[in-house]
Image (cartoon, grey):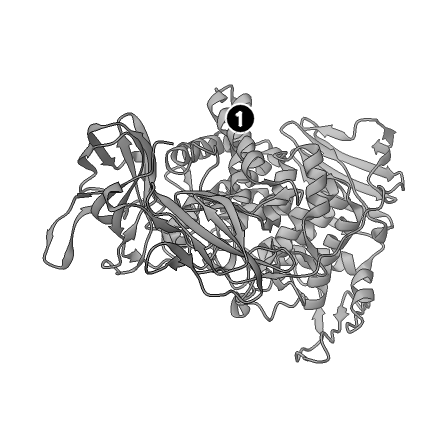
Amino acid sequence: LSWYNKSNPDVELKDEDKDGIYTLDMIFNPKKPIPQKPKHWKLEKDVSGLPSYQSGQLLIDALYNQALEEVLININPKDNTFNAGIMWPDTWTRDISYSVYLALAFTHPEICKNSLLKKTKNKRIIQDTGTGGSYPVSTDRTVWTLAAWEVYKVTGDQTWLNTMYEIIKNTLEDDIVNIVDKETGLWRGESSYLDWREQTYPKWTEPLDIYNSQCLGTNVLHYNTLKTLCQISKILKKPCDRYEKYAQNIKEGLNKYLWLQDKKYYGQYLYGRNHMSLSPRSEVLGEALSVLVDVASPSQAQDIVTNTPVLPFGASMIYPNIVDVKTYHNNSNWPFVQAYFNLACAKEKHGSRLSHGIASIYRAAALFGTNKENFTAPTGDPIETEINAVNSDAELWSIAANLTNVYRIFFGIKLHADSISFTPFIPKEYVGQKTLKNFIYRNSRLDITINGVGSTIKEFLVDGKATNVFSLPASLTGNYTLVINMSNELPADKSVNITTNHFTTTTPKPSLSTDKKSLTWPVVKGADSYEIFLNGTNVANTKTNTWPINIETNYKAYQVRAIDVHGFTSFLSEPVTVYSPRDEVKVDLGKASKSNEVSFINLTTMENTTVLIKVTIERDGWYFIDFKYANGNGTIESENKCGIRTLLVENKKFPIIFPQRGMNAWNNWGFTNSAKSHLTKGIYDFKLVFLPENNNMNIDVNEARIDYMRLIYAGVK
């Protein structure tokens, strides 16, 4: 907090010990005052059964106790599960999972079990509602594994282990059918928690484009889930070679396709339609997770924590930010994401960035008297975000972020399948003796005292006896007193390297000229030049807003992005595709319908579960295969009724996805994702089938209307 006061002289911060009442007075911006009364907080709930924390810093102790109280506030008495926040009285898969890992598995493992099981159905993890009817447009439900495994490690509950094994395995089997990209080895689906389209994707993207994207954070979660299943399989003596191979493919794919050698961190995602390109934005949750689960090599991990952009009030959720988009995921700081980045910084012993990140969480909780969900990047203010009305107090994952400063950083608690270990990191700003009492680990109760600062343990005592092993086995029972004396040696000082906030230009909107011999687009404000992409590859740079093209050859997809004077690039434009009419084949599938000029057939869980399609191929080569469809079961932003089918082409399987296009919008027609297949001249019998793995999150409603199948010839290479 001293860092915050020094760099922000307009803020007056006081802490006073008056019968446990702490007063925080804020003058946030004299030029734009926000009427606000001083916050007063006094502990009212009984937290004596939870781990207690004391240090020489009264304000930090108070924030810890306040966080414990807000955990209790979020317990739903109806079913003994956690709510996501005061204004979010329900459980979400990603909210609970990220929170459980950070802290809640330590404080309330049984309520964590209840909450995690609430987010399962049909012995599979439930994907939260979201874009296009969610799963498989959004696929980050596997974050559940991160939490479930942590609950097992803290409890050793064998029944829970067997339960989670079946749930994770079933979930992965469905994902393998529906979302794996066999070319890259990566898994498709929206960026984890960044589930509000225009906040982190170009405005032109449809749900299908988001399904096609291959994202850093989401893929790291899939990797972690596959590796965790293998750890569980080893304990249960079950085979796991197949899942290990998928995990290795993801790791190799991330390092081959997403690593930015010039920036020294991973890019945000691969995106496009039939040809994918890398968005060079950073995505801080994915960057942090890649370090924590060892997707990144040791040298990459050091680069990531050193180079990921950090702004004055904390890490920026994406960077650079997007112009003309309000603050929420864009242009923001989220304490729970900051917490994961802090853990990565602690692991890599980057002290200055760790101190900055801890201060980001404590400053927000102290100044606003509660654990809010998110804050604007330029001001650190929760009021100016797009969700002002529901930027909740006592937000669960922000609470967990606050607590993890104590559990996972100051005390360095790390759980393993058969032990608990300690790797404390005490930044110099937090000097003083610290005690954590009544910490429950399996059948033991631990009272832990830490003296000194730094990240190196000088002495580790268990019940007064020194040991060189800084861990305890899971088999211990009873009460233990641990004393950890730090060496007071801090890692070599590294600069925080605060980055100036930046917004990229708007995305170009190219179109074909009337003579179809060039691309043209309106001049983009702030653009210094433009890059031209052909089939996902950068082929040219121009200062003008036009570019000659050749439509005489095979299928081509052109995209344009703007570059500003600082070298930052906009998103790539929506692809402009050009090909000869003879390269397109349409296979009519529908029957005449009185209610619609377009003929169609219904796909439901009971009707047309297998559609046979006979196709004549006249040329050898690669083809993009998709379907014209409608799905009016919900809006683009909500519900859980995305249609899913599998296309069988000889002995090959391709997922075909039918996202929602609008509530009751059955006349709103679009195209599915494309299956890319090499075909030789001849007659084929394709099948569009509904497999057991094609269940969506609704299960009962998995529906679409299809008009025709389209095949576009893409050449011989």
**For the point 51% across and 19% down, which residue is it?**
237
In the figure, is residue 64 to the left or right of 169?
A: right
Place of residue 205 in the rendered image (x, y in percent of width and height, measured from the top left): 42, 55
The residue closer to the viewer here, 48 or 13, is 13
Residue annotated with mark 1: 230
The residue closer to the viewer here, 148 or 647, is 647
- Quarter of the image where the C terminus is located: top left
- Residue 469 appears in view: yes
Q: In this rendering, is residue 588 above or below 669?
A: above
Place of residue 695 in the rendered image (x, y in percent of width and height, measured from the top left): 32, 40
Classify 10 Å Cα crowding around label 1: few (below 14), some (14-19), many (20 and above): many
- Residue 192 appears in view: no
In the figure, is residue 237 to the left or right of 423?
A: left
- Quarter of the image where the N terminus is located: bottom right
Say what amino acid the circle numbered 1 marks: Cys
Q: Quadrant of residue 42?
A: bottom right
**For the point 16% across and 44% down, which residue is it?**
589
In the figure, is residue 221 to the left or right of 444?
A: left
Place of residue 87 in the rendered image (x, y in percent of width and height, measured from the top left): 52, 64
